[in-house]
Amino acid sequence: MRGLSLVAAVALVVGNMVGTSIYTLPASLAAEVGPLGLVAWALTALGYGFVAAVYMRLGRGQARTGGPYVFVRAAFGDFAAFQTVWSYWLSAVAGNAAIALAVVAYAIEFVPGFPDTALNRFLLAQAIVWGLVGVNLRGVRHSGRLQIGIVLLNLVPLVALCALALADFDPDNLRPFAPQGWSKLPLGMALIVWAYAGIESATVPAEEIHDRPGTIARATLVGYLLATFVFLLSALAVAGSTDNATIAASARPMAVALERAVGPWAGTLISVAAVVAGLGTLNGWILMAGRIPVSAAADGLFFPAFARLHARWHTPHVSLLVAGAVASALLCLLFSSTLLALFNFIALLSVLTTLLPHLYSMAARIFFARAAQRRGEEGAAQLAIALTAFLFVLLTIYGCGFEVIAWGLLVVLAGTPLYALLKAR
């Protein structure tokens, strides 16, 4: 059933992008690259403009749920499509556990008398995950309405406070501009890539979107522009209102910067907005995790049960429940400091595995653009856009570091026996 309107689809894209990372990322950027992070934000935003343009074009011709999997299978066949859906699904379910932990880390401060123990964090994270799984089981419309409300509660205070903070902009806070040198720019861009995960969100629940060809393209464009505006505004507000050393040393860089520029109340309000943002991101990615493998399962390239739709709510209930169960299992790593370190690495790896579907999707668009060019249906500009987007995603993968890339390759290859078993059936 088609249930997502244009507004809800935009909220899905923005909510999946403007999540908890924007509230913590300024500290990492300040420590690694300094104020040069502003240039990294601008270049990454420009690169993702090409990626957004590619997904807009791909989304216009899409008729099935699944996003990148659908594009890659049409261009390159079953094996590349399986690699895409395998890495994308693993990224979503592992990332959901990490998002839940980030939400709990902020939320626990607002529960008076609630002991901050591993058990309590675990229970609160489980309640959040399964509460949102329940919302998504009821249908995409319920999830879409919740997403619209959450995005508004996140963006309105964030944009308003950052605009007020710009009045306190001090150029001296940007000196030295590149304390670690300009060679750190690729690292800064790699850090920012995490914030843009989800730009493809409107393409995933394609069969549940009203007027899907036009809505998917418009939602991708509007979502990209709105998220980029928020990213650049907040980056300027934080870097210009607070010195780099203070930002780098803070676990709450956004709150600290706004407290200095606007007042103590701003820090509290922005912390609440961070909790809301995390809930929106988790809601959006639970929706995505349930739908990423649906078409692949129907095609025999993933577990067949994942293609089942609930008789009443018409949602992929098996896929949603399994995704929730995997996230719940990963949360058990909270009870061991050694395992928690492993979990943090898994969370980082999950971001890398979102980039492989991007890379394959950009390559698929190159394939389609070249074929259309030979038929005289498209000009050279479309091919150039696709090639630029491909090279940009390739650069961001390089920025992840060779250790993470190597582990990501192993994760993708580990699914090969499953592909063989599924094809044999």
Image (cartoon, grey):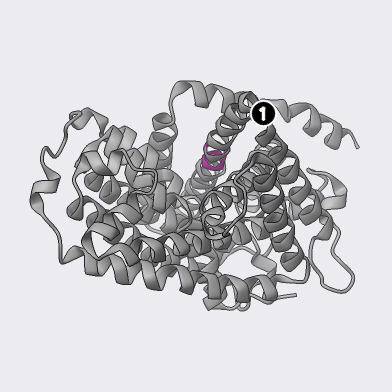
Report whether residue 93 is seen: yes
Is 421 or 346 nearer to us in this picture? 346
Q: Is residue 381 above or below residue 144?
A: above
Tell me the magenta residue range. 352-356
Which residue lies under the disc numbered 1?
336
Q: Is residue 230 above or below residue 4?
A: above
Outermost residue, left side: 172
Where in the figure is residue 212, as x and y percent of width and height?
A: 60, 73
Query: Which residue is drawn at the image coordinates 73% and 50% (left, top)?
Result: 293
Q: Residue at x 55, y 56 (%)?
A: 107
Quadrant for residue 136, please give it: bottom right
Question: Where is the N terminus found, in terms of image quarters?
Answer: bottom right
- Vertical placement of residue 106 versus 349, above or below: below
Would you say the magenta stretch is mainly helix, strand or loop? helix
Q: Amino acid at mark 1?
A: Ser
Q: Quadrant of residue 91?
A: top right
Is 275 magenta? The answer is no
Callout 1 environment at 10 Å: few (<14), some (14 to 19), or many (20+)? few
